[in-house]
Amino acid sequence: KQEVTQIPAALSVPEGENLVLNCSFTDSAIYNLQWFRQDPGKGLTSLLLIQSSQREQTSGRLNASLDKSSGRSTLYIAASQPGDSATYLCAVRPEGGSEKLVFGKGTKLTVNP
Amino acid sequence: NAGVTQTPKFRVLKTGQSMTLLCAQDMNHEYMYWYRQDPGMGLRLIHYSVGEGTTAKGEVPDGYNVSRLKKQNFLLGLESAAPSQTSVYFCASSYPDTSLEQYFGPGTRLTVT
């Protein structure tokens, strides 16, 4: 059974710092991996999607990498801002059960001014 | 273009009552999903649909029923609500391309007393 783990559960950093959020998954047979952002009391916003054949994706100050063989992904946030404060969720789409996503529990990020 | 919308935003039910949550999307997506989000559990898939008139069970389907009579709508029903169904419910949709990137609604907060 695929399991997704995100460490740490919470992270607090000063504004301007570069930071890395981690995601690991137990079964490397994935179709793709998606990073989401969730603000308190809100839905999920898709940030980046990496196909299994890709190594990384970039959008603005965000860069997501994927090492499928080792079961790891990282989300790099450059020059963090208070507006980046949110919970970041990682989800994998397993091969076979292609319609479904398996989610991690998230990392709650706080960027302090 | 409203994306994915959910009705209602909040609801309080008494044990044994029934209700229906409505999800609507205007992106012409084939696939739609219902998740629940609980503290410490992450998001879990309840039911999903790969097209009009089709539904399938997810990870935690017990106590819920769904219907997809129209492509743009996906209904989640609780026939006899239980306190264990207190949760935040999210609907999502995706286009059946190679990525199946999912787009989420804002959520419905349900409390069962």
Image (cartoon, helix red, strand yellow):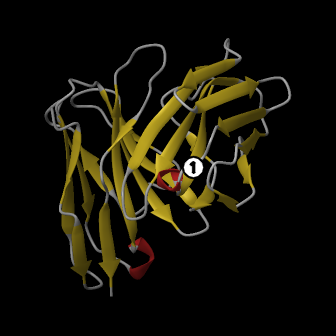
Q: Is A69 positioned to the left or the right of A20 in the image? A: right
The mark total stands at 1
Residue A50's x, y, as percent? 60, 22
Residue A3 at x, y = what percent?
Answer: 72, 46
Q: Is residue A6 above or below residue A23?
A: below
What is the secondary structure assignment of the residue under circle 1? strand
As rendered, which of B37 and B14 lies closer to the eye?
B37
- Image quadrant in which you'd find residue A42: bottom left
- Residue B86 placement: quadrant: bottom left
- The chain that hosts pointer 1 is A
**Which image quarter is the C terminus of chain B in?**
bottom left
Amino acid at circle 1: Tyr
| Residue at the farthest right position | A70
Q: Residue at x 37, y 78 (%)?
A: B82
Q: Quadrant of residue B10?
A: bottom left
The residue identified by callout 1 is A88
User: Horizontal and vertical percent for residue A12?
Assistant: 68, 63
Q: Is residue B80 left or right of residue A101?
A: left
Q: Nearer the viewer, residue A23 or B54?
A: A23
| Above or below for B25 versus B8 | above
User: In x, y percent, where is residue B43?
Assistant: 51, 54
Question: Quarter holding the N terminus of chain B?
Answer: top left
- A2 vs B89, left or right, is right
For disc 1, the neighbor class at 10 Å (few under 14, some 14 to 19, many from 20) is many
The residue positioned 73% from the left and 50% from the top of the image is A5
Q: Please give the name of the residue rendered at 28% of the width and 26% of the height, measured from the top-left corner.
A: B51
